[in-house]
Amino acid sequence: MNNRVLGLTGWQVSEIACGTYDSFDAPGDRGRRHVLALMQENLTAGVNLFDSAPMYGLSEANIGFAAPQLSASGMADYLVATKVLQSDRKGAIDQIERSFRVLGGRIDLLQIHNMAGWRKVLPYLVELKAQGRIRATGVTDYRRSSFREIEAAIVTGDVDVIQIPYNLMEREAESRLIPLAGERNIGVLVMTPICPLSGRRELLNRLRGVELSPYQEFGVRDAGGLCLKWLLSKVPEGILLPATSRVDRVRSNTAVSGTPDFPPDELKRLEQAIG
């Protein structure tokens, strides 16, 4: 697994990290054990950042359950990112404290989810960082209509990391947001790196005509790997957050790390194939 520096944090983060939306929202003892197995598989593959949120159901709690068991087995070297979705300081404090409890007291990166009340809540995240309770601050939104607000948050100088949607069918971040992050040395986490939240079937239909065999030398085993390798080749500073509940998909997703980048002509050919 290749690592990349996550902007101002200076952290060496695996270029393929782990999103947990839906995939870690697993109930009961069986669900907790499954999430533990997913985390173990990710860590074995070299993944070292897990991104969660209170809005992801049981994701935070399942990460917290797995933490002591991972530590006991010598697999404690990873980063925990989560989010807060509250429009005021008091609501944010209450939600953040709950996240600390269920995650076992550890939050490395704390992000404002969907830019909710960010002008009121971001100063509190800065306070938490100054106190040493968190190590980095971030903002995130899946809506392209919020990109201007993300830009405004970046220029405050109080944001270390942004998390944005970017994939073969959602490329709006290329024009302004990613270049601005590069200028300011802001870390970039990429959500939905394989397909849009609501456009998976459409993307898969477009990819049906793409022959995968020429991409095997790049570690590509399936359509998801093709999308991930395209992104790794396009954005050298980006950390990708694919989410999967399948152990075999963890293996196929991480297989694209450490292989050569797609050359420019291949990038263009793939983009043209998608339309």
Image: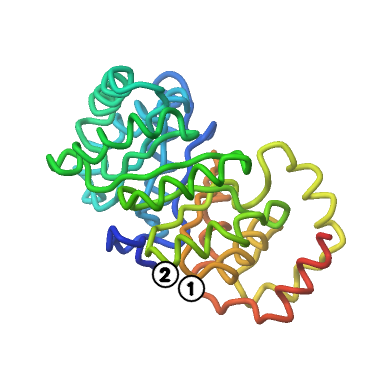
Q: Is 235 in front, or is 87?
A: 87
Q: Nearer the viewer, residue 237 or 130?
A: 130
Residue drawn 56% across and 46% down? 147
Query: Viewed as shown, does residue 149 lie left or right of 11?
Result: right
Q: Residue furthest left?
A: 131
Q: Amino acid at mark 2?
A: Asn
Camera-side residue of 103 and 176: 176
Q: CA distance from mark 1 to mark 2?
A: 5 Å
Could you tell me which quadrant the C terminus lies in?
bottom right
Where residue 118 appears, as percent x and y from the top left, is: 40, 33
As rendered, which of 154 and 60 lies closer to the eye?
154
Split into 4 quadrants, where in the image is the N terminus? bottom left
> Left or right: where does residue 204 sit relative to residue 226?
right
According to the image, label 2 marks what residue?
2
How busy is the neighbourhood of tag 1: few (under 14 within 10 Å), some, or many (20 plus)? Answer: few
Q: Amino acid at mark 1?
A: Gly
Secondary element at tag 1:
loop
Residue that appears at 40% across and 23% down: 86
Residue 63 at x, y percent in the picture: 34, 34
Residue 100 x/y as whole percent? 24, 28
Taking 153 as reference, is 269 left or right? right
Circle count: 2
> Which type of secondary structure does the marked residue at label 2 adopt?
loop
Q: Is residue 266 left or right of residue 245?
A: right
Instruction: Using the rendered view, name the quadrant where residue 186 is placed.
Output: bottom left
Q: Which numbered dot is residue 258?
A: 1
> Colour mode?
rainbow
Query: Upstream in the sequence, badge 1 or badge 2?
Result: 2
x 67%, y 56%: residue: 171
**Against 87, is 266 above or below?**
below
Residue 202 spot, x, y in % from top left: 81, 45
Marks 1 and 2: CB-CB under 8 Å? Answer: yes
